[in-house]
Amino acid sequence: MSLKVYNVLTRKKEVFKPQEEGKVKMYACGITVSGDAHIGHAYQAIIFDTIKKYLEYIGYQVTYVRNYTDVDDKIIIKARQLGVNPLDYANRMIIKTDKELSALGVQRPTVQARATECIDDMIQFIQKLIDTKHAYAADNGNVFFSVSSFKEYGKLSNRSIDDSISGVRKEIEPGKLDDRDFALWKNAKDDEIFWDSPWGPGRPGWHIECSTMSMKYLGETLDIHGGGKDLIFPHHENEIAQSESLTGKPFSLYWIHNGLIKINNQKMSKSLNNSILIEDLLKKYNFEVVRMTLLENHYRSDVNVIDGIFEQNEEKIYLFYKLLHEIDLLSSSYEPDKLSSDYQEIDAQFRTAMDNDFNTSVAIANLYEYINVLNGLMRKKDIERLVNMKYALVTIYKVLGLLQQDPKKVLDDIKEKYIKLYNIDKEEVENLLKKRKEYKENKNYEEADKIRDELSNKGIMIKDRGAETEWDINIIPAKIS
Ligand SMILES: [Zn+2]
């Protein structure tokens, strides 16, 4: 088997073959830090984090560059509203976003580039485009890319050059000669933040940032360029136009785009005010619950975040960790066999799923199958296989950032959360269980069952193990409002 990747540029699933054997150069567009990061940012970051980790898992050495856009219209407006310096504001948001992504288990990329650290490189890039007649400077200091100078414009988004209008009419952008052209450099208005340039004080346009930063750290041709599918046009189309006009070489061999987030079937948007912020998710759920919810989807499709979806996955994460914890309790002395047939089978199934265009959805579905196997082994007390399977799952699913925590701690945290949420008084539960035991001893099963029902209504499940009765919380999405 070899890795196959859906390439948006060719609209085909292709065998993945980077330029240099064993090495991958990957760039993904990062976050414009004009506000708090939301679940859409989390989705993209988690997808490309997983792609990087899988490429490493199958033996590639990956150089992954992700940027932060730390100067743009929205950042300037936001900083002005808050009465702070836009660069200070952007810096603060980068620190906050970094923390949140890392709390979601997203590894730091090899290079984390910031637009404002590469302004000189952008100015040089733009100057070369002007020198080769791919761009022009207007009298007012704006510089535009001339779309008609790049004959292949539209090849990524599959549209013809004539219907490729990125939305800004020339009347609105002074100095622009053609509606299709886009800004490479914007002159500074009023008291806006600016950098000096051959065309006067100003700042870079958004598209030129990514072309410059990716080439600076990865060279003229990337193996993989990624981003959300909403970036295909005009952002990525414009990146291709600038970059290929400059170098005459393909900008990226593979283009990978992830789907978008919907909230209860609706687009997530500022106007609907239905955004889910990463910080709020992390306050409510274990981070693996968030990863599981997002990776349960294949990355190319949209994720529909319906009410109760996180609780459903919280229940699953709870179940997984309960099993892992039970294995820990059974097996203190057995060392896992790293070449066991269970390990090899789980590894082979994982690779089959992921080699098919990073199909995390199938990889997670496999995980549910293993639960049944583990439960069966648990009944048979087959410690050897239980330990081997646990070792395999924890090692292999590291690629998806799942099953990586201390089981006991995850269980305690989730249990405590629901004890609070359901208003459960632990002492009262113990007393009810004592009473139930007495009823059972007196063969008064009717009363004993009443207590079971009463506990069930409080969100508590009970399980008899011989003479002992254990209780646990029951995560019921419907109960949670
Ligand atoms: Zn970009």
Image: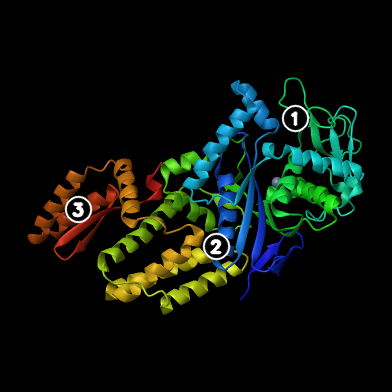
Residue at 16% across / 52% down in the picture? 433
Rendered image quadrant of residue 316: bottom left
- The residue that disc 3 covers is 450
Which coloring applies here?
A: rainbow
What is the C-alpha distance between the residues marked 1 and 2?
44 Å
Please state which of the two labelled residues, at mark 1 or mark 3, is closer to the viewer.
1
The reply to whether the residue tagged 2 has its Cβ within 8 angstroms of ligand 1 is no
The answer to whether residue 307 shows anywhere in this view is no
Q: What's the residue type where badge 2 is placed?
A: Thr
| Image-based side of 31 in relation to 329, left or right | right
Label pair 1/3, CB-CB below 8 angstroms: no
User: Reading the chain from its start, which is encountered first: label 1 or label 3?
Assistant: 1
Q: Position of residue 397 (x, y in %)?
A: 47, 63
Residue at 28% across / 73% down in the picture? 379
The reply to whether the residue tagged 3 has its Cβ within 8 angstroms of ligand 1 is no
What is the C-alpha distance between the residues marked 2 and 3?
44 Å
Q: Which mark is residue 360?
A: 2
The reply to whether the residue tagged 1 has its Cβ within 8 angstroms of ligand 1 is no
Observer-nearest residue: 404 or 203?
203
Observer-nearest residue: 310 or 257?
257
Q: What's the residue type where badge 3 is placed?
A: Lys
Label pair 1/2, CB-CB below 8 angstroms: no
Rendered image quadrant of residue 468: bottom left
Q: Residues within 10 Å of mark 2 (few under 14, many from 20)?
A: many
Q: Position of residue 444 (x, y in %)?
A: 11, 58
Residue at 18% across / 59% down in the picture? 469
User: Reading the chain from its start, which is encountered first: label 1 or label 2?
Assistant: 1
Q: Secondary structure at mark 3?
A: helix
Observer-nearest residue: 167 or 10?
10
Q: Secondary structure at mark 1?
A: loop
Judge whether 339 appears above or below 288 on screen: below
Observer-nearest residue: 177 or 186?
186
